[in-house]
Amino acid sequence: MMKSITFLLTLVSAASGFAPAAPRTFVRPATSLNMADIVDTAVAAGSFSTLAAALGAGGLVDTLKGPGPFTVFAPTDDAFAKLPDGTVESLLLPENKDKLVGILTYHVLSGEVMAATVVTMDGAKVPTVNGASITIGVKNGVVTVDGAKVVTTDIKTDNGVIHVIDSVIIPK
């Protein structure tokens, strides 16, 4: 009986010109019991493939999947695309691993710093995991980190928080 109904619906749909949509995957929102870590959250977002590749090349995936907590100022693929031609490809080479790790860890703070705290830190120099400090700016409600604009805040993960930035920040 079910096969007949399915066949009939298919015929009716085809005759009417209606094309069924492709199956959709629904993702259940994360809860405190089933959140993903920083790496898995970034990968699932779909706009951090360059960052994910860089974390892999730098050997930092396991670290950022660890207990944390961490705050990551995560540049999008578009942010990496703003770098001069050939920069990303060069950084991903094994002989440039130390430089890559230095840049990536410059985007990471130890501890969880939510946006409500960041907006109170105008002018603050905050130490990163790589040892150098970033400068937080807050002007007219816009937060910057070493000049990179924070475009999305407080993406909570089970081992910290991600704030999305529009540029790759480079240690001085």
Image (tube, rainbow, N blue to C red):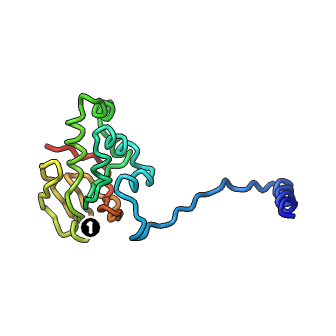
Quarter of the rendering containing residue 98: top left
> Tag 1's secondary structure?
loop
Amino acid bearing label 1: Met
Residue at x 73%, y 56% (from the top left corner): 20
Residue at x 41%, y 69% (from the top left corner): 33
Horizontal relation, residue 121 to residue 168: left or right? left
Horizontal relation, residue 57 to residue 171: left or right? right
From the top left corner, tell me how far across and down residue 71 is, in percent: 25, 59
The 10 Å Cα crowd at callout 1, few under 14, some 14 to 19, many 20 or more, is: some
Foreground residue among 108 and 84: 108
Horizontal relation, residue 46 to residue 39: left or right? right
Foreground residue among 4 and 77: 4
Residue at x 21%, y 64% (from the top left corner): 139
From the top left corner, tell me how far across and down residue 121 is, in percent: 16, 66
Residue at x 28%, y 34% (from the top left corner): 91
Horizontal relation, residue 128 to residue 56: left or right? left
From the top left corner, tell me how far across and down residue 154 is, in percent: 32, 65
**What residue is pinned by disc 1?**
114
From the top left corner, tell me how far across and down residue 161 is, in percent: 30, 62
Q: Quadrant of the N terminus?
A: bottom right
Q: Quadrant of the C terminus?
A: top left
Q: Is residue 71 above or below residue 106?
A: below
Q: Is residue 1 above or below residue 105?
A: below
Q: Total of numbered circles in the picture?
A: 1
